[in-house]
């Protein structure tokens, strides 16, 4: 590694000398064979070599087990990194921690307020909060709940989890750790290389004389600054995610806590029986509440049904009267016919007697 750095330094020195000579020649004649563009290419190649060396050095710092002595000879490959160096490497690792917690509580307002106060006390902040107040007419089991996304300093994460566990009944908890050390070091190496290139471009810009060279340098300088800002933004984002762990907290209001330990047979029977009685009582209560709430609808339906019944009765009564009148008319007609038949028979009998 050191031998390679030594060769790189020699090449850098030669290129720097060539750059000085080229700048001198450029100042004396604009038609010289070496210009600003050639120097930029040489300068960029040096920066790229330095970036590659820095990446190798960074990776070696986190994963190598071999060392190098002052005489540029490698040490025995069986030697390992000292314990202090290993501890330092672990401490410098970039770890992003994410925690998911589901918590039950009988005192919803108290727990939510305590969580907010604890977050402020630990120096964190609530990134998002989605709360539901449980208002509904259709289920007596509807309760309040809240979803929170919380950012907590990584050194205070365990303290926050312990506080939440003491205030409520934790039914579920999971933790995820993402190691972004290599990505972070790679971004740092590129950023440092871009900063070096930016400084050299600024020096070249001060020494440039032709408009063409100035435009070329400014274009490259603009690209370098854009890439540099992008990488610094990514590094800041990683720093924030590393320094502040993310906690996804779900708070659910309940009447009875979910048992953490497995219940015995008798406990299951007694708990089930009590729950059944509670369900019956809650059902009767909800039925009464439903009845009172829907009284206006029930009154309207009662009136409508009563009107329909009266109309049907009236129709039935009228139909019965009409049928009775028809039967009466039919009986009168039949009686009249019989009377006529009888009169006819009497007349015929008289005529026969007279004969």
Image: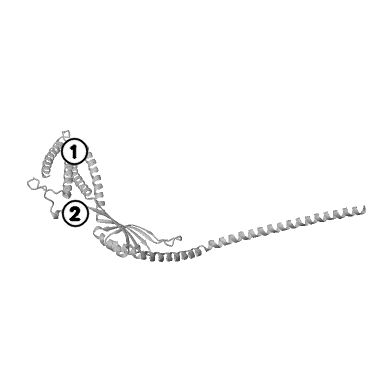
Question: In the drawing, does residue 51 fall left or right of residue 161?
Answer: left
* Percent coordinates x, y for residue 83 in the rendering: 14, 55
Looking at this view, is 276 or 284 the one in front?
276
Question: In the drawing, does residue 226 fall left or right of residue 339?
Answer: left
In primary-sequence order, the first of circles 2 and 1 is 1
Q: Residue at x 75, y 55 (%)?
A: 330
Q: Is residue 250 above or below residue 61?
A: below
Q: Quadrant of residue 267?
A: bottom left
Looking at this view, is 236 or 94 the one in front?
94
Looking at this view, is 96 or 319 the one in front?
319
Q: Residue at x 61, y 60 (%)?
A: 309
Question: In the drawing, does residue 123 fall left or right of residue 200?
Answer: right
Query: Looking at the image, which residue sits at the far right?
Result: 355
Question: Residue 118's mark?
Answer: none
Gap in Å between the C-alphas at discs 2 and 1?
Answer: 39 Å
Q: Is residue 106 visible?
A: no
Q: Which secondary structure lies at badge 2?
A: helix
Q: Residue at x 17, y 45 (%)?
A: 56
Q: Are marks 2 and 1 in contact (CB under 8 Å)?
A: no
Question: Residue 41's mark?
Answer: 1
| Residue at which label 2 appears | 90
Q: Is residue 291 visible?
A: yes
């Amino acid at each position: 590694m050191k031998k390679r750095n030594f060769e790189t330094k020699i090449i850098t020195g030669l290129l720097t000398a060539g750059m000085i000579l080229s700048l001198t020649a450029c100042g004396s004649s604009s038609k010289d064979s070496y210009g600003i563009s050639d120097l930029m290419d040489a300068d960029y190649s040096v920066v790229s070599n330095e970036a590659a060396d820095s990446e190798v050095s960074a990776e070696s710092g986190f994963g190598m087990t071999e060392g190098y002595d002052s005489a540029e000879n490698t040490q025995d490959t069986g030697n390992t990194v000292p314990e202090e160096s290993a501890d330092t490497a672990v401490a410098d690792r970039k770890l992003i921690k994410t925690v998911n917690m589901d918590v039950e509580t009988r005192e919803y307002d108290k727990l939510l307020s305590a969580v907010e106060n604890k977050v402020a006390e630990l120096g964190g902040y609530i990134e998002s909060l989605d709360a539901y107040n449980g208002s509904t007419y259709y289920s007596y089991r509807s309760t309040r709940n809240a979803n929170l996304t919380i950012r907590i300093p990584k050194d205070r994460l365990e303290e926050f989890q312990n506080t939440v566990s003491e205030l409520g009944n934790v039914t579920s908890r999971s933790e995820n750790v993402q190691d972004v050390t290599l990505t972070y070091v790679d971004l740092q190496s590129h950023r440092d290389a871009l900063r070096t290139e930016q400084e050299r471009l600024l020096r070249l810009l001060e020494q440039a004389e032709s408009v063409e060279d100035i435009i070329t340098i400014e274009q490259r300088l603009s690209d370098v600054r854009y890439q540099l800002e992008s990488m610094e933004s990514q590094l800041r984002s990683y720093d924030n995610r590393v320094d502040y762990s993310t906690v996804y907290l779900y708070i659910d209001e309940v009447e009875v806590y979910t048992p953490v330990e497995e219940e015995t047979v008798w406990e299951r029977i007694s708990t089930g029986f009590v729950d059944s009685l509670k369900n019956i009582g809650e059902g009767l209560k909800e039925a009464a509440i439903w009845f009172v709430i829907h009284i206006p609808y029930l009154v309207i339906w009662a009136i409508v049904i009563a009107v329909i019944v009266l109309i049907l009765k009236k129709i039935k009564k009228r139909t019965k009267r009409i049928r009775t009148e028809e039967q009466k008319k039919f009986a009168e007609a039949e009686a009249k016919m019989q009377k006529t038949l009888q009169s006819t028979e009497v007349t015929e009998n008289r005529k026969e007697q007279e004969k």
